[in-house]
Amino acid sequence: MKRPATIMLQGTGSDVGKTVLVAGLCRLFANRGLTVRPFKPQNMSNNAAVAAIPEIGGSGEIGRGQWLQALACRTAPSVHMNPVLLKPQSETGSQVVVQGRVRGEAKGRDYQRLKPELLGAVLDSFARVGTGADLVIVEGAGSPAEINLRAGDIANMGFATVANVPVILVGDIDRGGVIASLVGTHAILPETDRAQVRGFLINKFRGDVSLFDEGLAAITRFTGWPSLGVVPFLNDASRLPAEDSVALERLARPTAARTDGRLLVAVPQLERIANFDDLDPLIAEPGVKVVFVRPGEPLPEAASLVLIPGSKSTIADLAAFRRNGWDADLRRHHGRGGHVAGLCGGYQMLGRRVADPLGIEGPPGEIDGLGLLDVETVMEPEKTVREARGVLPDGLPLTGYEIHLGRTAGPDCARPVCLIDGVPDGATSTDGRVFGTYLHGLFAADEWRRRFLRRLGVDATGVSYAAGVEAALDAIAAELARFLDIDALLRIAEDARTAPSTS
């Protein structure tokens, strides 16, 4: 079977904008009538999404970035779009998800030894994603310049050389040193890896592009790689879900910042925060200011709502929550009449107790919860991973997804947040000011969000959050069409149709 046209974007470092560029290119080519598919061999993120496992008809996990890229392609997400997902659980270890299903946990050095075994799954998924596609756009992870990790690599050049996929190297000019980063990458790559690179592009440029003409010429002179364009800073990217916790460095702001009359929502920045893109619809509301509170800072007294997000390690993050003094801040907030919400792991923390007798998320043990909900949680081996369709008690439909370990029960569950497939989900306190739920995507439900904010005194906009994401993807695609040599990108991708892989 003839291979699809294929191209891979790798970066000179993390957070150079690869995810957004791939999403924009996916939408650009989908708008031109091509059948496009995204692919990322290995991702590391606790922002996960639910995707189909086509072979068994079930559901598994992929990185949120590949879910967004599938949306850009206007296609259903599949676990094969991100066959290896690493979900950090500790300073040295991550849960390893292979083709959508949890395989186990691995420490850093253990994972380095495991990577060669995962290459088969990566190549299998790559072949499945390409079936029936006109174009596959691959995203690398981190940087190919990390030559200390080159042995057994499956994320960057290790994949590109085995699958024989042409590479475009992305440099981020906004962080400075872009010439050195591109030229330096060329200098330290082994010759076989260097040969896979067919060109470069510059991302996040501000100002007059012509001022960088000499810079482009210098990069080509040192590397021999042609420039495929200079992309300006894409403001619409802020309307897209963030892929991983690197984005929190930009979102976290001092809690003393002015609210300008907006409703203040305080989000404790947990060490193992997960799926914090749940907050994006609130961030998009003009009448709301969301502040991610960094460790060591107090929860702001001006907050009307404290929202505890998801966590990959509930007990560990709950212990850290207390070390930061946030438990006392939360009690004072609630005592002043403030509202509290918990999503997934945050919901579990709000209860009276969290127990992990089998040591699923860490060492076996249990911990007292924050006590604002009369519920208890017990971690269990079976993980819930599914798309969810629910309704409010008054019949308003909701859509979202569940990714969680644990079973939560108690008297406050008699006041559920919603029904999912007819089964009550979540809990609400007797005073109605505290709630928790396992339903991710709740705030993306436009009518529910409007009703909830109205209770807090905010007249929310009538704008659809999902429509805003779609509009942002189209706007980014239009910008890329203006500033990149799209015909050259396609020619490079077409070369991969007849290039044999070495697998």
Image (cartoon, rainbow, N blue to C red):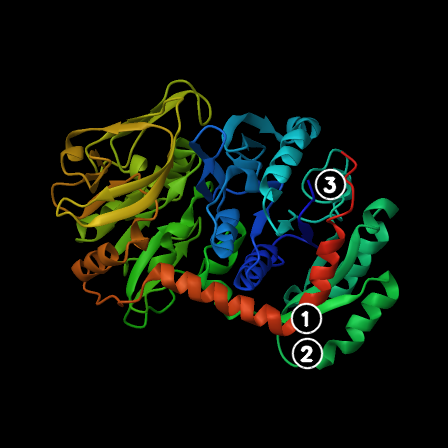
- Crowding at label 2, few (<14), some or many (≥20) Cα neighbours within 10 Å? few
User: Which structural element holds mark 3?
Assistant: helix
Left or right of residue 272: residue 171: right
Of the numbered discs 3 and 1, the one sitting upstream in the chain is 3
Residue located at (34% from left, 64% from top)? 289
Instruction: From the image, tell me which residue sits under label 3.
Output: 163
Left or right of residue 246: residue 285: left
Q: Amino acid at mark 2?
A: Val
User: CB of mark 3 within 8 Å of CB of mark 2?
Assistant: no
Tell me the CA gap for discs 2 and 1. Answer: 7 Å
User: Residue 445 or 317: which is nearer the viewer?
Assistant: 445
Q: Could you tell me residue 97's position as x and y percent?
A: 53, 32
User: CB of mark 2 within 8 Å of CB of mark 1?
Assistant: yes
Question: Would you place residue 383 above or below residue 494 in this image?
Answer: above
Question: Would you place residue 204 above or below residue 85 in this image?
Answer: below
Instruction: From the image, tell me which residue sits under label 1.
Output: 230
Question: Would you place residue 297 above or below residue 359 in this image?
Answer: below
Q: Could you tell me residue 437's position as x and y percent?
A: 27, 40
- Crowding at label 3, few (<14), some or many (≥20) Cα neighbours within 10 Å? some
